[in-house]
Image (cartoon, rainbow, N blue to C red):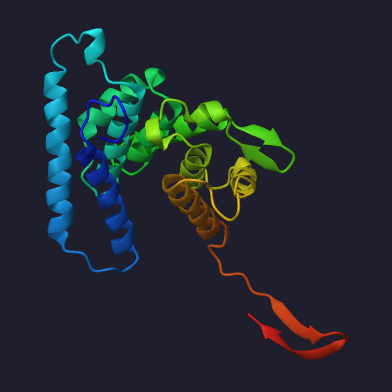
Amino acid sequence: RPWPGSRSSADLTVTAWVLRVLHHAKSRGVEIPKAVFTEGAATLHKRLARRKSRRRKPPSHSDRPSQAEEVERAAVLATLSHLGVPSTGYIAELWGRRAALSFVARLHLADALAHSGTAGDAGRAATLVTEALASLRAEGSYAMLPESAATGAGVWQAGARASGMLLALVVRTHPKHPLARRLMRGLLREQRSGHWGTTQANAWALLGLGAYYRAAEATAPTFKYAVFAGDKRLGGGQM
């Protein structure tokens, strides 16, 4: 199981994350059989439908999903949207009760909306991102999320993870937002000995920073350089 006390088996979470990683790899030119995505997406859709059918009866308090399970489900929805097969009904359901979701679950929902391709969803994603930006704590040229932002994310509870997710979403929904650069600086500031503490935090921090730099340097920069040994110029050029 992905965390103590969870009522959901680990394979749903692991399948979603593996498919996301493979999707990123394919977008970078790695050859991956199409069946991996079609069969994986079908499994995720089937598991979501099974859970939805179980919830048609009025749930008791113990049957209601925990915050960590809501994070898991929202993450699955985001993966399906990235794969081009969004679960529009489930996305609409979570959007309808977004106020009850944890901060990280709302970020995953924004990710699902931003990539769903459904009319109106891009605007809904931008709304969630705007609300998330209101949680930032600004310090000079830095902006960071408070520790409380990751509360309820289960084992995925890490501030840098949420910051990386938010940075990637800001770049997609508000590419010219003035807080994007400050959030990028804040994320870099959170590094300790060159990393962010957990595998998930490292992954999302790098994804967020990668998205930021691709947007910030959409046009390749050019500059002149020179190499010196003391006062002696050894060479130079332009890149």
Percent x, y for residue 66?
32, 21
Percent x, y for residue 51?
16, 26
Residue drawn at x 63%, y 44% as measured from the top left: 186
Q: Nearer the viewer, residue 120 or 162?
A: 162
Query: Position of 215 compared to 123: left or right?
Result: right
Residue drawn at x 30%, y 50% as measured from the top left: 20
**On the rendered image, what quadrant is the C terminus found in?**
bottom right
Would you place residue 116 above or below residue 104 in this image? below
Percent x, y for residue 65?
27, 20
Would you place residue 192 above or below residue 75 in this image? below
**Residue 39 makes an appearance in the image:** yes
Q: Nearer the viewer, residue 109 or 161?
A: 161
Where is residue 6, by image quadrant? Answer: top left
Query: Position of 156 compared to 179: left or right?
Result: left
Percent x, y for residue 164?
50, 45
Would you place residue 25 above or below residue 149 in this image? below
Where is residue 95, by image quadrant? Answer: top left
